[in-house]
Amino acid sequence: MSNHHRTIITCTGCYIPEKKIPNSNFKENIFFGTDGKPIDLPNSDIIDRFREITGIEERRFISKDQVTSDIAALAALNALSGNSIEIESLDFIIVAHNFGDVTFEGRRSDIVPGIASRVKHKLGVKNPTTLPVDVLFGCPGWLQGFIQAHLYLQSGEFKKGLVIGAETLSRVSDPHDRDSMIYADGAGAIIVESVTADEKIGVLSFASRSDTMENLNLLAMGSSNNPEYNRSEIFLKMDGRKVYQYALETVPMVVKECLEKAGLGLQDVTKILIHQANGKMDEAILKRIFQLYGQPDIPDDIMPMTISWLGNSSVATIPTLLDLMVKGKLNGQKACPGDLLVFASIGAGMNINAMVYRLPQ
C-alpha cells in the first residue's frame, strides 16, 4: 500500500477566562420578552427554568482589558507551550470568530486588520509567508477552519498551521434578554500538520451544510428587548425554538453522512464532541443520531460536556473540550491514542458541519 498524506493534530491548547459568572449574577437583571414587555416572573424562577433547560450553572467572561485577539493568542501559546514547534515554520494561522475585537467600553465589532493578522502580530511571527486567515461561519467556525486547514495541507502547498477559535459573546449579549445567560467567552487552538502514513489516522472525512433561505435569520443581530434601550446598539439575537427544531432535524443527518463518507458506523465512534449551546438540545441530537442507526442504547460517556461550567463559548467550545480531554483535565473524559472522534457544530447561517477524526496511535 502506498503512503497517504494525513492531516493530524499535533498540539492542543485553550484559554479559559478566570472570571466565573454564576447564574446568581443575573438576579438583578430586568428581562423583557421579544414583544418588548417585561417578563412577569421572579428572576429566581427565570434562572431556575434556564438552568433546567440548558444545563448551564456558570460561564466565563474575559476581563475588561481583553479582546478576542488577545485570548486567541493565549490559546495558541498554550498549544505551543512545551512543544518544539518553531513558530516561524507555520504556513498559516486560521482564526475563527464572529465579532472581531469588541472592547468593553466601545461594544463595536473591529475586524480591520483581521483577527488572524492581529494574532500573528501578537505571537511575534515575522515570516511574511505565514498566511493569516479569518473564518466567520457562526458557531461552527472553528470546525470549518479545521476543514479549510485540512484542504490546505492536502494540497501539498502547506505543511503546518494553527487553527484557533476565539469568541467574546459577553460583549454582544443583551442584558435584557434571557438568552444572554447562555453566552460565554473563551478560546481553543490546535496545531495541525501533514504527515505521510499508511494507516487511516487524522481527518478521515468531513461534511458541511448551509441553509440560508428560510433559516438565515434564526441567529442575527438586533436591538435590545428593552424598548427604551439605545436602539443604535445591537446584540446577538436567537430564535431558540426554531434553532432547536432545525438542529434536531439536520445535525444527526450530517453526522451520519460524515461517518458514511469515512466508511464507518456509529459502533466505531469513541466520543462525539458537539458544540454546546443547550444541554437538552445536545441530548436530543445525540438521541436522534442513535435512532438513525436503530440503536436505543446510548453509552453514558460518549458525549463529553462542559456547558454546565463554561456556557456557550461559540467557536471555542469544541477545541477547548478537545484540549481538556487530551490533557486529562475533564472529569474522567479522556481522548486516547486510536480513539475515533466525531466533531459536530451548528450555528448562525444556519450552518452545520461535522468531521470524523482518529487520534494517531
Image (spheres, rainbow, N blue to C red):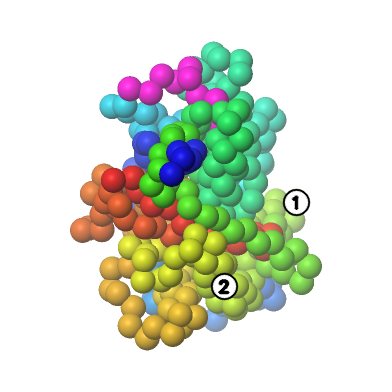
Q: Quadrant of residue 130?
A: top right
Q: Secondary structure at mark 2?
A: helix
Q: Nearer the viewer, residue 55 or 360?
A: 360
User: How packed is label 1: few (under 14 Cα within 10 Å), some, or many (20 or more)?
Assistant: few
Q: Nearer the viewer, residue 168 or 47?
A: 168
The answer to whether residue 31 shows anywhere in this view is no
Tell whether 4 sits left or right of 176. left
Q: Amino acid at mark 2?
A: Met
Q: Residue at x 63, y 66 (%)?
A: 238
**Residue 356 higher or lower than 238, as above or below:** above
Q: Which residue is mark 2?
A: 253
**Residue 313 higher or lower than 96, as above or below:** below
Where residue 108 appears, x then y in whole percent?
66, 41
Tell me, yes or no, whether the highlighted magenta stretch contains residue 218: no
Give the extent of the magenta segment.
84-94
Where residue 247 appears, x then y in whole percent?
57, 72
Work out which residue is located at the far right of the displayed protein and give it.
213
Tell me, yes or no, whether the highlighted magenta stretch contains residue 85: yes
Decide which of tag 2 and tag 1 comes sooner along the chain. Answer: 1
Q: Which residue is mark 1?
A: 232
Q: CA distance from mark 2 to mark 1?
A: 39 Å
Q: Amino acid at mark 1?
A: Ser
Q: Residue at x 37, y 86 (%)?
A: 296
Tell whether 101 sits left or right of 278. right
Where residue 123 appears, x then y in whole percent?
47, 22
Q: Secondary structure at mark 1?
A: loop
User: How packed is label 2: few (under 14 Cα within 10 Å), some, or many (20 or more)?
Assistant: some
